[in-house]
Structure formats: C-alpha cells, structure tokens
Image (cartoon, rainbow, N blue to C red):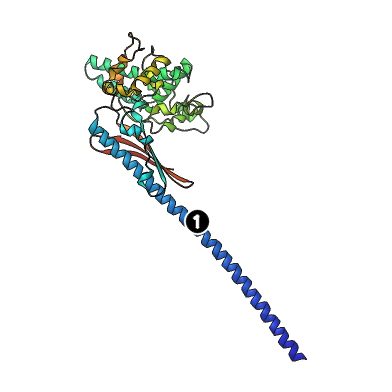
C-alpha cells in the first residue's frame, strides 16, 4: 500500500515537473518569438531608412548635375529652366520600389540678409579710394536696406515705419563687428541682449540661417514664420550672397514689388505673368525685360545694380518615400563654374 502511494506520488511529481517545464519552454518561446519579431521590425525599419536615405541622396546628386548642365546651356536663370521644373518630373521609374520627389529652390531670388553689412564694410574700404567710389558704395548700401524696408512696410506684412527701421538697424548691429560707438540709431548691441532673460551675446558676425533671426531685436516668430492671417517672411530671405542683387527672373512678387517704391501689387503680378509665358523666355536674358510688360509704368526704372538674371545659390530638397516611411535630404549648394559646392546638408 505504501509502495503504491510512493509510485503514484512520483508519477504526480513527474507530471507536475513536465507541466512546469513545458510552461517554462512556452514562455521562453513566446518571449523569443516576440524579441525576434521586434528585431525584425527594427531591422526592416533600419533597412528602409538606409534605402530611403540613399534614394534621397540620389535625388540630390541628380539635381546637382542638372544645375551644372543648365550652366552649360544657359547664361541666365529662370523658372523655365530644367532645375526649376524638376519638381514636376516623375522620378519613381529610377527605382524598383518607392517614390522620389526633388525640388530646387533658387536662393538668388531672395533678399540677401548679410549683404547689408558686407556692403557697409566695402563702403568703409572704399573711403580709401576716390570720392566717387565711396559715394557709389554708400548709395548701394542704402539701396539694399531700402528693399528690406519696402518689403516690411508693404502688404501683407505692414510693419510700422519705426518698427521696420528698428528691425533693419538691429540686423546691422547684430551682424557688424563693431559695438558701442557703431550702434545704429534704432538698433541694439551687446548691452541690450545681455539684459534679456535669459541673456545672450550680440553675434557681431554674419547670419548663418534664417532661423537665427529670431534672436535679433524686433523680429518675432509671427513675422518670420507667419500666422493664419499673414504669410511668413522667412521664404523671402536668405543668408547666402554678398552683392545684394536679386534674380528678377525668379523673385517672388513681393520681392519684385520691393524693388521700387512706385511698384504696386498689380504691377508685380503682371511681371510674374510676363516671365511665366514661354514665348517671353528668351527676353529674360537681360534685366530690362520688365520694360516690355504691357502694364508697366513708363516712368519707373528698376536699378540695374540691384538685380541680376544669374543665380549661384540653391537649396535642393529631395524626399524619398517607401510605404508610410519618408526621408528628406536638404542640401544648400553653390554653383560655381564647373562644380557644385555643398554649403549645408540636413537629413530629416
């Protein structure tokens, strides 16, 4: 009787042991399966990320080659060029799977922020030369500032005159290398920025990005990036370029309007319509094409030293997509004689 009980107990213990082992193995298997599945998802995501990045890089390289080819074919730049029309091309055929969209933005058609101070320095150097050279430099500097002043004052920004002058003077103080005695009338130097909470220093150097402008006295996020009621100022500005010249062939209507105090919104829109007409493409080789716009006022002249038809700086935005995933490469480049120099590279 006792032996039979022992045998039954041993069988029961063995059964419990087997059940326990099976349970442990099941838990381990499930955990392993879960980890394998997570590793697979991570691996697939990483693989897709690498593939998308390379696809986006391919788009950037393609845009660079098109910019170089365009320089060989044309001695002027306009929105009729292949680089400007690249956004309309279907590039999905370049890959077995996925999509690719590439846009090239002309930086030469924007207001050059740093040119206000760089020209000022050139004007100071010119004082060592002839009086005529000095006068030309100083006048050019004033003309550059006036473009920004007119841009800020006009619709849709409608910045008050005093505020507009304050922004311009503060920008100059932010960028120039002087302090104290060189402060502009409505500007701000080191003492102002050190009094803020939190305090920071006046840069006294060139602006490196449009985002940096938020640090400058008078420039608000609402002005720079817009609101529901007002468009952003940021797309009209660039830290690139030093001569202050704007490509009249690709500039926004708001920039065109700011080229002369006598230009209104209707005239600027007429200029954009004229240059968009394929029949007028060859007319865009010279800066004086605006005189052929039927409704352009005969008594208004745009200063030749403030405009150009050639652009050297561009921003390339290449976006690759695969399923629900996307990867974008943004490259700021300078087109030189036979090469493309990358000035800034961001991946997002």
> Alpha-carbon neighbours of circle 1 within 10 Å: few (<14), some, or many (≥20)?
few
Q: Quick check: can you spot residue 181?
A: no
Q: Residue furthest right?
A: 1
On-image quarter of the C terminus = top left
> In the rendered view, does 27 fall on the left or right side of 320?
right
Q: What is the quadrant of residue 109 in the picture?
A: top left
Q: What is the quadrant of residue 166 in the picture?
A: top left
Q: Residue furthest left?
A: 130
Q: What is the quadrant of residue 93 in the picture?
A: top left
Find residue 122 and report its horizontal and vertical position in percent: 28, 23
Find residue 107 and report its horizontal and vertical position in percent: 35, 30
On-image quarter of the N terminus = bottom right
Q: For mark 1, what is the residue? A: 41
Find residue 269 and report its horizontal and vertical position in percent: 40, 18
Find residue 29 and report its horizontal and vertical position in percent: 57, 68
Decide which of 32, 120 is in the foreground and name it: 32
Decide which of 325, 251 is in the foreground and name it: 325
Look at 48% across and 16% down and name the residue there: 160
Q: How many marks?
A: 1
Dot 1: element:
helix
> In the rendered view, does 225 fall on the left or right side of 255?
right
Vertical order, 46 against 31 (above or below): above
Q: Quick check: can you spot residue 340?
A: yes
Vertical order, 94 against 11 (above or below): above
Look at 40% across and 47% down and name the residue there: 53
């Amino acid at each position: 009787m006792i032996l039979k009980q022992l045998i039954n107990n041993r069988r029961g213990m063995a059964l419990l042991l087997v059940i326990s082992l099976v349970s442990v193995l099941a838990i381990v298997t499930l955990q392993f399966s879960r980890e394998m599945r997570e590793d697979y998802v991570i691996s697939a995501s990483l693989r897709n990320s690498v593939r998308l990045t390379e696809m986006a890089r391919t788009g950037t390289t393609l845009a660079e080659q098109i910019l170089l080819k365009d320089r060989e074919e044309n001695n002027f730049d306009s929105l009729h060029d292949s680089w400007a029309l690249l956004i309309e091309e279907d590039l999905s055929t370049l890959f077995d799977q996925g999509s690719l969209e590439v846009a090239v933005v002309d930086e030469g058609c924007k207001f050059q922020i740093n040119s206000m101070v760089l020209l000022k320095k050139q004007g100071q150097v010119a004082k060592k030369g002839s009086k005529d050279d000095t006068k030309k430099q100083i006048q050019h500097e004033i003309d550059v500032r006036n473009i920004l002043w007119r841009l800020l004052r006009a619709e849709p920004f409608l910045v008050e005159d005093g505020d507009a002058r304050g922004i311009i003077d503060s920008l100059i103080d932010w960028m120039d290398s002087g302090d104290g005695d060189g402060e502009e009338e409505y500007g701000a130097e080191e003492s102002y920025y050190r009094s803020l909470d939190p305090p920071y220093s006046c840069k006294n150097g060139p602006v490196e990005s449009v985002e940096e402008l938020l640090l400058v006295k008078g420039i608000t996020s609402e002005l720079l990036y817009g609101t529901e009621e007002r468009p952003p100022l940021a797309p009209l500005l660039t830290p690139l370029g030093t001569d202050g010249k704007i490509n009249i062939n690709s500039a926004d209507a708001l920039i065109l309007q700011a080229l002369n105090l006598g230009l209104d919104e209707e005239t600027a829109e007429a200029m954009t319509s004229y240059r968009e007409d394929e029949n007028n493409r060859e007319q865009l080789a010279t800066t004086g094409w605006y005189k052929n716009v039927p409704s352009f006022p005969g008594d208004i002249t745009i200063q030749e030293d403030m405009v150009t038809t050639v652009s050297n700086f561009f921003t390339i935005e290449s976006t690759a997509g695969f399923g629900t995933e996307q990867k974008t490469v943004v490259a700021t480049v300078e087109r030189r004689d036979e090469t493309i120099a990358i000035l800034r590279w961001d991946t997002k």
